[in-house]
Amino acid sequence: MALQAQDTLRSFTLSDGRNARFHALSALADLGIAQVERLPVSLRIILESLLRNLDGQRVTEAHVRQLANWQPQATRNEEIPLIVARIVLQDFTGVPLLCDLAAMRSVAQRFGKPPQIVEPLVPVDLVVDHSVQVDHFRESNALDLNMQLEFQRNAERYRFIKWGMQAFHHFRVVPPGIGIVHQVNLEYLARGVLRQDDVYYPDTLVGTDSHTTMINALGVVGWGVGGIEAEAGMLGQPVSLLTPDVLGMQLTGSLRPGVTATDLVLTITQMLRKANVVGQFVEFFGSGASTLTLPDRATLANMAPEYGATMGFFPPDEQTAAYLTATGRTADEVDAFHRYFQAQGLFGMPQVGAIDYSRVLTLDLAEVEPSVAGPRRPQDRIPLSELDARFRALLSQPISDGGYGKAEHRPTPDQLDHGAVLIAAITSCTNTSNPSVMLTAGLLAAKAAARGLTVSPRIKTSLAPGSRVVTDYLEKTGLLAPLAQLGFRLVAYGCTTCIGNAGPLDPELEAEIAARDLICAAVLSGNRNFEARIHPAIKANFLMSPPLVVAFAIAGRVDIDLTHEPLGFDGTGQPVYLSEIWPDAQEVATTLQQATEPASYRRLYQDLDGMNPLWQRIVAPGGPVSDWTPSSYIAEPPFFTDFALQPPAVPPIRDARALAIFGDSVTTDHISPAGSIKPTSPAGLYLQQLGIKPADFNSYGSRRGHHEVMMRGTFANVRIRNLMLPADANGQPIEGGLTLRQPDGTQQFIYDAAMHYQQAGTPTLIFAGEEYGTGSSRDWAAKGTRLLGVKAVIARSFERIHRANLVGMGVLPLQFLGDDSAACLRGDELFDLMGMDNGLQPRQHVSLTIRSPDGQTRQMTLLLRIDTPMEIEYYRHGGILPYVMRQLLG
């Protein structure tokens, strides 16, 4: 007899005596399939989804047996079809996703089908959090002023979102001004366990933001995907992933006084990047993990993309249940959560030896020390005591070795110089979701203000919490005022500086930075600090805890050892040291007891639509199909141009040209920037042709609903370096989105060269080093690549989400083998990709023929990074969207 979903149904009893059913993992042993109690908890939760959704088509008995018999060190070549319970979006990725869904409805209508065949089958929540920018920051009403500007700039986008609310079922929107998607998800959207009729099951999700993993702290399986993969998931397709290795991250001991969860996550990020956990699950366990509060766990889970993992998962335990209660979930919800996971045998933090992991790493929490990370990557941790020496070393280090190539630095007091802090931002869900570090920042600010310390007015300071709960408890405890006194006024409830929405600096400051080529700094409590992400003029960006952001703002520079040097001087001229004003653990604990209560969460998350009058005033068109009103923000995407019911044959890739050759750690910010648009860039010139003034450009992120802007913005980051270009007159690398068009070697924008190649019918390739596509889930990094005519990206290694996004857009990801790399290429060669004419197989070898202008020919063997049979189908159809559209029309 074939296994059927009902074969694993069992029952448990709720506290009120009601009977509830669930798909029991223990039933697999009764059925003779497998003993699964030693599987990692994260895999068992996915296994439950397979049992519940077993239909013989999307999920088969073979899928169940494969995962139930997972072996820690096995070769990974099987895919898991996960059908998620819900999907979360933020507006920068949600608006282009909505454009794609609207375009699919237009296609359905053109083919004589009801537009409503394109409809989400699972609940979708879009949280508007990415659009607000820090234009105002020292004014007492900065919050209102920034929100008014946000609505002025984004009215067209918000009308389109409101159209989507009425056009699609299961599509909810959390309006602007409420909070950041991951914190809202943690505090409100996630309900613990879900149910359909009397069958209970675990919450699972994917989100169109890489930091969706923050929800792993709540025992929820979920991770970030590109928008195109999320669209397939909401339209009924399983989210396909290669069966992962699971690294067990054993935590022992406890954090020392004065050490924060931020210090811990920066330590773990450095540690796990070195361990190469890309594409793997990380599951925390052990006595140290048990001691961490849920907000501390959320900080660790949030930065899973920074350490490269698919998830940073914490199994559900008493801390999880207590957090659900503390944040206002109902007693029935918490009871169901508790009893469900106990019935499944999944409740409680695993201890040493209980689980079979692929490998185990151990960290003693007592060894963690105060740290920052930077100046360009989150994994580059620097102990606080070593920041001064490290920054000075980087200043003089040659650019070719990752430094700044400056002469020896001797700081001049009160003069703008290298190392000056110009942006100090308490921002990001990573840390503002954690009351402990936020209250520590407030207490430190109060003590600093009491000693007469101030922050220089040239520093752009801001407080942008991930939810209104934060300001509620800062007000209750009297700590909002001292933060404001030091310049950290409430500016927004959104991502702001962390995603590049820091807003402009003073024009005179920017001019001086440019004229003197200064290496100035931003300090922020965020999760990313990639080049040109925070602000184009700021070249040194350091991640740190909120209290350290306050401390460095007071100090005004990063070339300082705060463990030995004073932050500043009080009114009597006495030095004030960080250790003197750092609050002790008892102060923080006492303040924390006064800070939050369940009623506050319930009050602040009710009637979300009615909370913002500006949102209520937005009037949107109705109907199931978009009228595609002309707009510079929203346009019908071109991905269904010439769409047919049968996929066309995939053309061979012959006589291709290199569009660009990049080095290591090219991020999705490099590929598709989210921040400001330069007037002289292809996107800036295009907008000016439409009559839009540079002051009204807004950002790339806000214009992701318009492909003409975004394809011009692809590879337009001001810090990206194309290795095809020669050095400038000073011997320095040329930065910006430029290339040499072949065969004549004309230097021009990458966009312009790409259009030339497309008109000539010449396919193009991108070459890169390690970690290509690291960073945000940003599907426009793949969409833009596709629209530029790039047929394949050939790299030393890929980050997980971007590799999947390339496949999802019909672009081949290919990986160098052994010691091969692009280092031997000049960029003037011709390329042929051989070995694909008779069909493709997952992870097959492909031959690259390289023909130099002098007639020499070389060959390299590449690994095809289409990893699963389902991805082969997506590629054969030209991407996920055409594949799903053909399924719906069929």
Image (cartoon, helix red, strand yellow):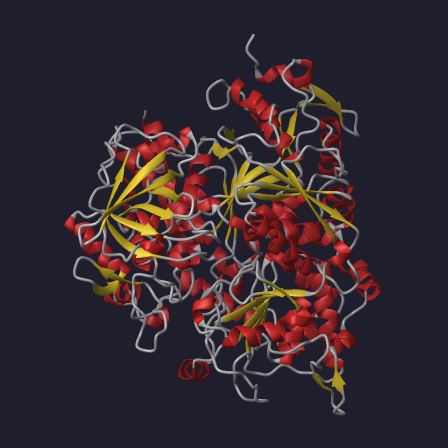
Q: Quadrant of residue 720?
A: bottom left
Q: Can residue 715 be seen in this view?
A: yes
Residue 746, above or below 769: below
Q: How many labels does the image show?
A: 0
In the rendered structure, the answer to whether residue 445 lies left or right of residue 679 reads: right
Q: Which quadrant of the rendered structure holds the C terminus?
A: top left
In the displayed structure image, the side of residue 617 where residue 649 appears, left or right: left
Quadrant where the N terminus is found in the figure? top right
Q: Is residue 631 visible?
A: no
The residue lying at 52 percent from left, 85 percent from top is 416
At horizontal 21% and vertical 55% (from top left) the residue drawn is: 755
Task: Choose between 713 and 254: the one closer to the eye.
Answer: 254
Residue 450 higher or lower than 312, as above or below: below
Q: In which quarter of the image is residue 586?
A: bottom right
- Residue 465: where, in percent of width, then height? 61, 62
Task: Give percent across and percent down for residue 813.
Answer: 37, 43
Residue 857, position in %: x, y?
Answer: 23, 46
- 890 relative position to 609: left or right: left
Q: Where is residue 866 in the image (x, y as percent from the top left)?
A: 40, 36
Of all residues, the one furthest to the top in this rendering is 1
647 horizontally vs 483: left or right: left
The residue depicted at 62 percent of the width and 14 percent of the height is: 7
